Image (cartoon, helix red, strand yellow):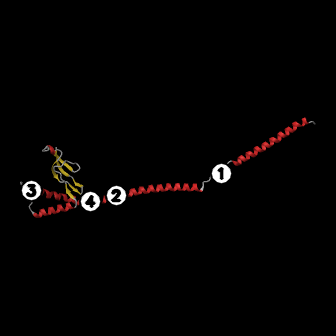
Amino acid sequence: MSKKDKSPEMNSEKKEDSSTILNDQDQNGTEKAENAKPKGKKRSKKLTKEEKLKLEVEELNIQVAELKDKYLRLFAEFDNYKKRTIKEKVDLMKTAAQDTMSALLPVLDDFDRARQNAEDENSDVKFDDEGVMLVYNKLYNSLNQKGLHPMESTGEEFNPELHEAITEIPAPTEDMKGKVIDTIEKGYLLKDKIIRHAKVVVGK
């Protein structure tokens, strides 16, 4: 056999060997590539100790902020409650005897009417008894010391918060329009709190 006849066969054998080698290399490369791929959770990144500490610090800071907010709210509510309680207690102390004072006002009214009639020159009523005057002054001063004060109404501007208008009459002068012409029944204050409105006649 000549060299020319052998060359084709040898060439074909060489081609088969080279293709086999390439296939083996491709398979090995594929297996290596598959082995190199991360396998789900087993290949997940683990937190370092420093990162864990940072997360814990952040969570603790959030808890501290929430607790601080709750504390401030509770403190504000308690402070408001304390102020309200003190105010109510002071108001109660100021007006503790309000019912008793109100019950005694008609007695003062009777004394006032008797004194005014006695001071009227045309009246037959006399109020010269020193004992009666002594009782009146003692009662009035005792109530005054407890915080009871009569309103000054006659000649003042009509104020619906202080006065109760019984009727209106023509004002005797221009400057008396809208003012109290006469006081039918005195008004009283108990330490700046109205316990009885003044009943008045208003000029129009």
**Left or right: 41 in relation to 103:** right
Precedes in sequence: disc 1 or disc 4: 1
Q: Alpha-carbon neighbours of circle 1 within 10 Å: few (<14), some, or many (≥20)?
A: few
Q: Position of residue 183 (x, y in %)?
A: 16, 51
Nearer to us in this view, 108 or 66: 66
Residue at the spot of label 1: 43
Amino acid type assigned to the residue bearing label 3 in the image: Glu
Nearer to us in this view, 57 or 170: 57
**Numbered label attached to residue 83:** 2
Residue at the spot of label 4: 94
Residue at the spot of label 3: 119
Q: Secondary structure at mark 3?
A: helix
Q: Alpha-carbon neighbours of circle 4 within 10 Å: few (<14), some, or many (≥20)?
A: some
Q: What separation in Å lies between label 1 and label 4 (alpha carbons)?
A: 79 Å
Q: What separation in Å lies between label 4 and label 3 (alpha carbons)?
A: 35 Å
Q: Secondary structure at mark 2?
A: helix
Q: What is the quadrant of residue 190 in the picture?
A: bottom left
Q: What separation in Å lies between label 2 and label 1 (alpha carbons)?
A: 63 Å
Amino acid type assigned to the residue bearing label 4 in the image: Lys
Q: Which quadrant of the figure contains the C terminus?
A: top left
